[in-house]
Image: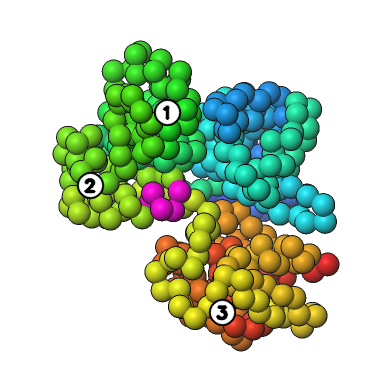
Amino acid sequence: MLDDLKQTLGDLASYREVLAHLAGRGAAHTGHRLPERAEIERAVQRLHPRHMHLRLVETVDETPDVRTLSFARLDGPLPPFRAGQYVSVAVSIGAVRTNRAYSISSAPGDARLEITVRRKPGGFVTEHLFTLVPGAEVETSGPTGSFVFEPLIDRGALVFLAGGSGITPFRSMWRDFEQRGPTPRVHLVFGVRTPADVIYKAELKELAARCPWFTYSIIVSEPGPGFRGRKGLLDAARIRAEVEDPARARFFLCGPNAMRQLVEAALAELGVPRHHVRRELYGPPTDVTAEVGWPAGVTASRTFRVTVDGHAPIEARAGEPLLSSLERRGVLLPALCRSGECSACRARLLAGQVYMPPSTRVREADAASGYIHTCVAYPLSDLTLRVHPGACLL
């Protein structure tokens, strides 16, 4: 992998040198040949592949309902990525083609790419992933995402606030710190429901024993009788008890939406500046009707007609993300994060009204032009949409 990366960087560096040479002497007086566009695209694809073809090599059960899937890439070497990024896993289940984003839980430079998945009862994709056995093949996006450590900005002590399977990007980070540095002071505050839900339990214990820069606390919300550890939720009182000087620390936050909202309010109460908090969005809300700003008169089960680029209308439930409704009926949009952040699934709203949670990050130019993020957009009326030219309308 390292040799391949060096080759790719060398290709790009040589290209820049040739451009500089031509600018100084003129193309007519040099024997250099500019690489063809296709050559440059191939070099870029080695660094930033749009898609990857992976084979499952091994599975490890972390808890009764959490499993780590370890993959080897079949169509080239694993590309470089940054600890904290994710891949989007594409699956076909029956007649439905869809995808879900999963944080990479292995470290950059590892021979295999790993994701750690929590099984959700009735979960459309997680149930499918739990049926995979070694030898199964899957398609994913290339690594992407901005939930990463920036050494020039994230100075001082780091606090990782994780809820449930939200610990997965942090595993990639602490492994990366240990393997390559830098090794800032890190304290992981990990909220779980029961003591049996602690993911990477043995690894956490071993890491803390050998790395003086790493400490961790497990906070259990439903401990049961006889439990002697830390109890409760990740509220302001708990964070104040765990973190020496919250206003001066840098916080990384990843977990279910309810936990994220609780922690964000707690950090604000503790006087933590907003620019000291990085967060990873965690998919659409479990119950969008409980979100701030949801209209009281619209029930989750109410249906509306959605017309896409003049095709026959489809039905969409108010309580289901528009992207899921479209996929269920054969309209396939590009999608990556499914959390309202990356904008890959955007569509232009020509008529009608949708609800998007306050956490949705729509660029100003997109909002001014009427674009919505379909992964976290919920119909509140009949809609007319124009989708990306690359969308598949079956």
Question: Is residue 129 one of those drawn in magenta?
Answer: no
Q: Position of residue 245 (x, y in %)?
A: 16, 39
Label 2, on which residue?
236
- Mark 2 falls on what kind of element? helix
Q: Residues at badges 2 and 1 in contact (C-beta under 8 Å)?
A: no
Q: Quadrant of residue 136?
A: top right
Q: Nearer the viewer, mark 3 or mark 1?
A: 1
Counting from the top left corner in percent of width and height, residue 88 is at: 63, 47
Amino acid type, label 3? Leu
Q: Which mark is residue 195?
A: 1
Residue at the spot x=69%, y=35% of the render? 130
Disc 2 and disc 1: Cα gap in Å?
Answer: 22 Å
Inspect the magenta stretch and tell me whether residue 258 lies in it: yes
What residue is shown at x 58% (from left), y 33% (from top)?
A: 65
Between marks 3 and 2, how big is the CA–CA gap? Answer: 35 Å
Q: Residue at x 42, y 28 (%)?
A: 195
Left or right placement of residue 349 versus residue 267 in this view: right
Amino acid, disc 1: Pro
Mark sitting earlier along the chain (2/1):
1
Q: In the image, 5: left or right of 286?
A: right
- Which quadrant would residue 64 be assigned to in this image? top right
The residue at which mark 3 appears reads as 380
Give the class, few, some or many, for how many residues have Cα within 10 Å of label 3's Cα (few <14, many ≥20): many
**Which of the two labelled residues, at mark 3 and mark 1, occupies the earlier sequence position?**
1
Q: Which mark is residue 140?
A: none
What segment carries the magenta color?
256-260
Q: Residue 180: tell me if it is visible.
A: no
Q: Residue at the far bottom: name it.
A: 351
Between 75 and 266, the residue placed more toward the observer is: 266
- Say what secondary structure mark 1 lies in: helix
Query: Earlier along the polypeptide chain: callout 3 or callout 2?
Result: 2
Q: Quadrant of residue 151?
A: top left
